Structure formats: C-alpha cells, structure tokens
Amino acid sequence: MSGPPTCFLRVAIDTPLRRTFDYLPPDGDPPAGGWAPGLRLAVPFSRGEVVGVLLEAVTSSAVPPAKLRRALAVLDATPLLDAVTLGLLRWAAEYYHHPIGEVFATALPVLLRQGRAAQGVRTCWWLSAAGAAALTGTAQPPVRLGTRQRAALQRLQAATDGLDHDAYAALAVADRAALREAVDRGWARTDEQAPRRPAMLATPVTAQRPVPTAAQATALTTIAAAGPGFQPFLLQGVTGSGKTEVYLRLLEAVLERGQQGLVLVPEIGLTPQLVSRFRARLGTTLSVLHSALSDTERLAAWRAAREGRAGVVIGTRSAVFTPLDRLGLVIVDEEHDGSYKQQDGWRYSARDLAVARAQRAGVPVVLGTATPALETLWNARQGRYQLLTLPVRAGAAGAPRLGLIDLRREPKHQGLATAAVLAMQRHLAAGNQVLLYLNRRGFAPTLFCNNCGWTAPCRRCDARMTVHLHPAGLTCHHCGLEDTLPYACPTCSHEVSPVGQGTERIEQLLTDQFPGIEILRIDRDTIRRRGELDAALERVREGHARILIGTQMLAKGHDFPEVTLVVVLNADQGLFGTDFRAAERLAQTLTQVAGRAGRAERPGEVLVQTGFPDHPLLARWLEGGYDAFATAALAEREAAGWPPYSRLVVLRAESEDEGAALAFLRAAREAANALPNSGVRLLGPAPALMERRAGRFRAQLLLESVQRGALHQLLGAWLPLVEALPRPKRVRYALDVDPIEVA
C-alpha cells in the first residue's frame, strides 16, 4: 500500500484568480530533468482541461491530498522558460499585483497556451543508397538523370549532415521540386529532426558601414568600456543623429561574442523599416514578433529565438518576454512611447520590464529616443542611468528652422493658414516633399446645427461622432459605433454642417489647391491591412507622393529624406489637457514630428499653427527645444508632487449601471481607510473624464505616495479586501500600477 504523496506541483493557470493551484504529479515517471520550474502541464480545471506552467514542486500543500486532482500530462521535455524569464514574470506579477496565471499566459504565444509543442521539428533530406548509385552510374537497371535531377543529387551528396530545412527553403522552386521527385523515386530520404542549435551565431556583415560620428563613437566607446554586466544607458539623440547606427554596431559586437540581442519597438509600423536595415547589416536570422503575425508565424519566430537560431529578436511590447538564454544586450527604441504600456488586462510597461530583465540577466540595456520620458530623464539626472547624447544630425543635415503661425491673426481657410500654403508652394516648387501632421482622422470632429446647437452624439459614449466622407457616415472613435449622415438636424430640422478639420478634410482641401500633385494620407482609415503601410511609405521614398498627411503613424521613426517642410496643423489639442502628462506628450510629439523635416543635405522648416503662440510650453520649446521643456516640466512635477517624484496607482471600475462603479470604489476606499497607512494618499473616487464609454460608466480611485514600498505594502493588504467586497456582477475593476494616464 503506497503512502501519502511526497510531491505536489504548484501551477500557474490563466485565470483572473490571484493564486496558484496545487496538483498531484501525473501518472508515470517524472521528466528526465525532474520537476523543474517552467514546464507546461495539462491539468484538469473546473470542468475542462487547460495548460498551466509549473512554478515549483513542493513537499506539502495547504489542500488535503485527497482533495487534489492529478495533472494529466507533462507537455515539455525541458523547461519552456529559462530561469531569468521565470524570475522576471514572478517579480512582475508581484509588482503589478496581477494574477500570476494571466502574467504567464501573456508571455507565451497563443499556440503554446493551447498545448502546441514548444520545439518544432524540421525536415532534413539525405541521399539514399539508390540515389548514390544513380549518381555514380552503378544503378541496376541503369537510370538517366536530367540536369536538375543530377544537380539535386549532387547537392545532397555534398550535404554530409543532410540538407536542412533552411537550405531547402532557400532553393529555387524548380530545385525544390527536383528534390521532392528524388524522394518519390527513392533516390533521397527525409526525416524529421529537432532543429540543430548553432554553436555560434553568424558573423555580422561588415559591408556599407558608415564612419561613426564623434558622438556615436563616444557612445559606443562608453558602452564598451562599461564591460559585461547590467548597466542602463539613456541614448538621447536628436532625430536623424544616427541612433540606429549605434544599435547596429552594438548588436554586431553581441553577435561576434555568440550572444543574442533583444530590440523593442513601440509599434508595428516601425518594424519593417528597422528589420530591413538590420538584415542588410547583420548576418544572422532575425525573429520578428508583433500582433500582426498569425499564431503560426508567431510561434515559429518564438521557437527560433528560444532555440538559439535567431541572433536578434525585434518586436513590440510582448517580445520582452521572449526566452533568450544567450542574451547579451537589450535595446528599447523610442523608449518614451506610450505604446509600451499595456492598457487593458495586465497593465505592464514593456520598457520598465526590459530594464528589469536586463538587470536580472546581467546585461546592458540601451534606451534610445530624441524625447526621453520625464521619468527616464530623471533617472539619468539622478545617476541611475548613464546619459549618452547625440546632439547633432548625422551627415550634412542641420536642425530645422522652427516657427509659429498665429491663427488669431493669420488668414486661414478650413483650418489651413495662408502662410502654411505659401510655404508649401515654396518647398514643392523646389522639388521637395511636404508633411502635414494632424492627429485627428476623419473629415471633421463633429456635425453641428447652427440653429439649435445640436451636435451628433454617440449613443454609447460621452463623446461626439466623427464625420467621415469615404465611406459617408458618422463614427465614434472611442467605441466604434457607426451611423448614417443625417441630411438635417434631428432636433429642429435645420441644415447641419461639419465643424473642424480631420485628415480626410485636409486631403480634400489640398487636392483642390494643388492639382496634379500626388497626395498621400496615412492614418487608420487608409492603412488597414498588412503591407499597406509599407507600400505607402515606399511611394514616399520613391518620390511619387509629394504631400503627406498623417496622424501619429507618420510621427515616429520614419526617415523621409526629401521632406523639407512639416506643418503641425493643430498644436492646441495638448496645451490644456486634463492629464498631468498632456504637456509632455505634446512636447514629444512636436519634437518627433519636427524631426521628419530636413534630412540629408536639405534644410528643413517646421511651422506650428496655434491660437496660443504665447503659451509657455511653446515658448520653451521654440527657444530651447525638448531639453528646455523637460527641465521646466520636471520642476513643475516636483512642486506638484507628481511622478517621478511620487508613485501612482489607479483602481478603475466600470459598469453598465450608472453609479455602480462609483459605489464600488467608495467601498474600496473605506476598506483602505481601515488599514494601517504610512504616507499613502487616496484621491477620489471620481468619474473618469469621459464617464460613459462603449455603454459603460467609468470611475477611478487614485493612490499616491512618495514611498514605493509603502504604496505596495498597502496594495498587498488592500487587494484581498477589494476582491471580497460585494459588487454587482456587471461591475468590472482593474488595477493600474504606474499609470501613464489618470484622466
């Protein structure tokens, strides 16, 4: 008779419950390496079967063994995640106070969560005995080989270790067909093998390497002198100063040491341009990871990274979790970008986790940008990060001329000032390109009745519907609700008209004013499918499109050598924002957009249309650039006690029932007030700036403290009380640690 169990498996399961689950080991022998953390297990859960990740094997459980269920199967021969990634995820679950099962699920491709094999198999081709006889002419009966058949057999004969999948995929279509025919005729055989892991990654390609500028050389020397081990660097370089060249040279050194590099980019749109440059310079396989990939493509890229076949991983937010056991360097491009912060589910910051991962792995991390987040700049000024600067543009390009257009005095037509039109004519006549930036898509922000003041409202949000002409209709850009365009005011039956400007309206206006000149509009209405952005940018680079109109999609990271004029059509949207980061985002946007003007040897000009030319933010930016703004903004943050001089957490709640979310948050605050509190302020609860969105009423409770430890200590004691609060089923809540928006 067997005794009581001596081993229990503690498993993380994708569930909103803030706990782990204990199981008995499955029937059969344990894995060869024992019950190592990072293995996936198929386990029974509720009435079904799910895939979980083993966190640890323990000798006791708080649950009586008789009540524990047995795991069904082990899905991996070796741990799926390495020790560094495992430690990072466990720490992140604690820091963000998020259910650990959802944290681990976020880190894995969808197919792995569904039980797909972590290690792929790859087909290899071998020359058979019959094939060797056919090639040497000793086959009986004799065979005559065609040119391609003979070449195929000779290729197999030369591949003493077999022709692997990568070599097969690189062949021409006809050559691959000849190999398949050889298999059919018995001259070749195939088998499936686990991918062979290279001992060293490929040697970087050294052709076409530009000579580093003095600032680039200083940055590279400084990073190299820091030696191995964790060291965070802030690489602050003006647009066009060659930050990517620094990245490439750092990655070349990493590859030469047989290590791997991880490069994060904020958005999918920046990935193709970066990948093409990296492929042209680095002689290694690249794994590209972003949300536009299919599940199969994502798993293949993840496998190549984990198995060591990819020397460099380039990806958006979730790529920070890609397992790389030879990690040598982490790069975060455009580190200031808000896209690095996940805004639903587990609300993590990929930038911050990239720094934490580099620290745990003992490797350098480089945060690159022209406009550092104020928290990052503060870390550099405090000595936590080492600041490296690229103050001038590479080559002969100089800084663009900056100017304001006062909309109070300047004549304008449909939102475009006469001075801006004249500047466009001048730059176009010189054979250059022009970019107009307006972060507002559609034809007009609203439809308005001059008689009674009616504006087209969204039925599900506290917002107005945006007017679109192609196709004609009204759309809410917050919840996606669509409606037809009314011919008359539904309240008083008078005529209605679109008010304000969107990118579609500006495109129509410029089409009339600049006939015969190709105009390209780039926003989410024109770029919907995969590959469309690449095609549009190619038309820009080839010089076909002379006038570019776009939203944020055009503001980040793109290199347009022939754009010499940038016009910011409405800078006033960010001057009076309610969120404490609104001014920072505006200054970053203005600087980033201005950086599109005047690359190569063509001087650039930037014109900013505003109704508030005397605003302090614009004055500082014009006189001293982003650095002057940042210095003043940090002083204002310190006086107000906002980050980075304090830490914030937001508890958000929403419900279809008006008042229910606020009532829940009031109860949550009462629970917090009953706990010992050392220096944590609770502000609110209060309705969100847009209280009703997508049919749900939203509210928030803000927690603030200058002491991170005190804040997290309170959260640890408070959240179990919040979970135990009675609440209607339709009330949903979420915790946001280090939020980037609090409005």
Image (tube, rainbow, N blue to C red):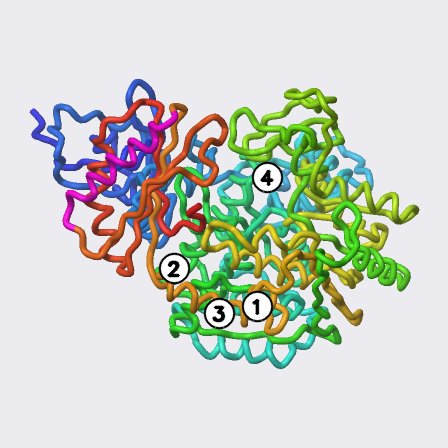
- What stretch of residues is rendered in magenta? 658-676
- Which tag, 4 or 1, sits closer to the chain's start? 4
Rendered image: mark on residue 643: 2
Q: Position of residue 406 (x, y in %)?
A: 71, 60
Q: Are marks 3 and 4 in contact (CB under 8 Å)?
A: no
Residue 263 in sight here: no
Q: Residue at x 60, y 68 (%)?
A: 619
Q: Are marks 4 and 1 in contact (CB under 8 Å)?
A: no
Crowdedness near tag 2: few (<14), some (14–19) or many (≥20) residues, C-alpha within 10 Å: many
Judge by depth and name the residue closer to the eye, 189 or 314.
314
Task: Find disc 3 in the rendering and name its residue.
Answer: 632
- Residue projecting furthest to the right: 516
Judge by depth and name the residue closer to the eye, 326 or 582.
582
The amino acid at mark 4 is Ala
**Secondary structure type for disc 4:** loop
The nearer-to-camera label among 3 and 4 is 3
The Cα atoms of the two marked residues, 3 and 4, are separated by: 39 Å
Judge by depth and name the residue closer to the eye, 39 or 1.
39
Is 148 placed above or below 24 here? below
Q: Position of residue 274 (x, y in %)?
A: 64, 56
